[in-house]
Image: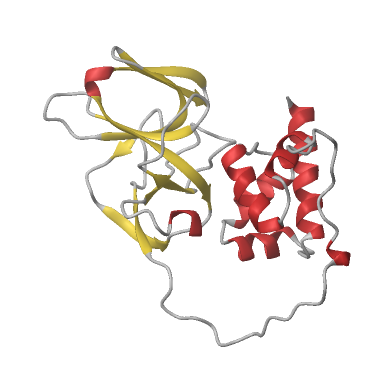
Amino acid sequence: MFHVMSEKADRLRQARIRAGFRFASDAANALGVVASTYRAHENGQNDFDLDEADFYGRKFNVDPYWLMTGRNQANGGATPPPNTADVGPPNAKVRAKVIGQGKKIPVFGQAVGGVDGEFLMNGSVLYEVMAPPILSDISDAYAVCVSGDSMSPRYEDGEICFVDPGRRVKKGDYVIAQIRLEENGALLAYVKKFVRHNSSELVLEQFNPAKELRFDARTVHSVHYIALAGNA
């Protein structure tokens, strides 16, 4: 698994360089993603899925299937990304910075989380941040601030997770689950890895300490997809 992630990370780095970005931080800024998130994908610390490969592929002008597998989707051959040396000189003009574009989304959380990193989801907003481009058109997008180290090294204490509530969740995705353990009790939010959700239970995976969390399906208020994370 690590070998596959390393190869994917190396292809992403090749695509970034051939797209004209000398540094990973330059690419992250141009893509509108959190720099630490992009660097984790390029250095192989975190894996990226097909949706993220599609996003990078469109921005770097490479086949996302090549980013994922090292092979071209059209003919199955090993095809490197296009060489930008064959592309003509840029003809764009640098104009004044556009002000007022994008939108802000709320960040929920609390200073100290519970034993499993859970925190009260009571609607109290810590602050607002600019929505990343992939969430700029999502009307109900929001973010949460990670409490504690229960999901380290994937998410660290204080890191911001950006959430797309409308996206379908599948096994292996990272999510924020809102749970009401007691009738009329407060909602508790858990940032975890999704295992399964059926008519009887919701199962989530925690990293530190490693264990599974199981919740009766009747206590589950919502399970929302984490699109990306980093330091805002």
Of 195 and 15, the residue lying toward us: 15
> For the view shown, which residue lies furthest in the front direction?
75
Q: Nearer the viewer, residue 126 or 168?
A: 168
Residue that extends furthest to the top in the rendered view of this protein: 200
Q: Is residue 219 above or below residue 54?
A: above
14 displayed left or right of 165: right
Which color mode does the image show? secondary structure
Q: Residue at point 85% right, 37% down? A: 78
- Position of residue 78 relative to residue 123, above or below, is above
View extreme (bottom): residue: 96
Q: In which quarter of the image is residue 59?
A: bottom right
User: Would you say residue 44 is visible in this rendering?
Assistant: no
Q: Position of residue 44 (x, y in %)?
A: 73, 39
Q: State left or right for residue 39 relative to residue 223.
A: right
Between 142 and 152, the residue placed more toward the observer is 142
In percent of width and height, residue 22 lies at: 79, 64
Q: Which residue is drawn at 45% across and 30% down?
A: 192
In this view, 131 is above or below 14: below
Residue 83 in view here: yes
Classify 15 as above or below 207: below
| Quarter of the figure with residue 33 | bottom right
Q: Where's residue 223, x and y in %?
A: 35, 32
Choose top left, top right, bottom left or bottom right for residue 30: bottom right
Query: Nearest the camera: 46 or 19?
Result: 19
Q: Residue 200 in the image: x percent, y percent?
A: 29, 12
Which quarter of the rendering shows the N terminus? Answer: top right
Count of marks placed on residues: 0
202 displayed left or right of 83:
left
Q: List the single residue furthest toward the right.
A: 85
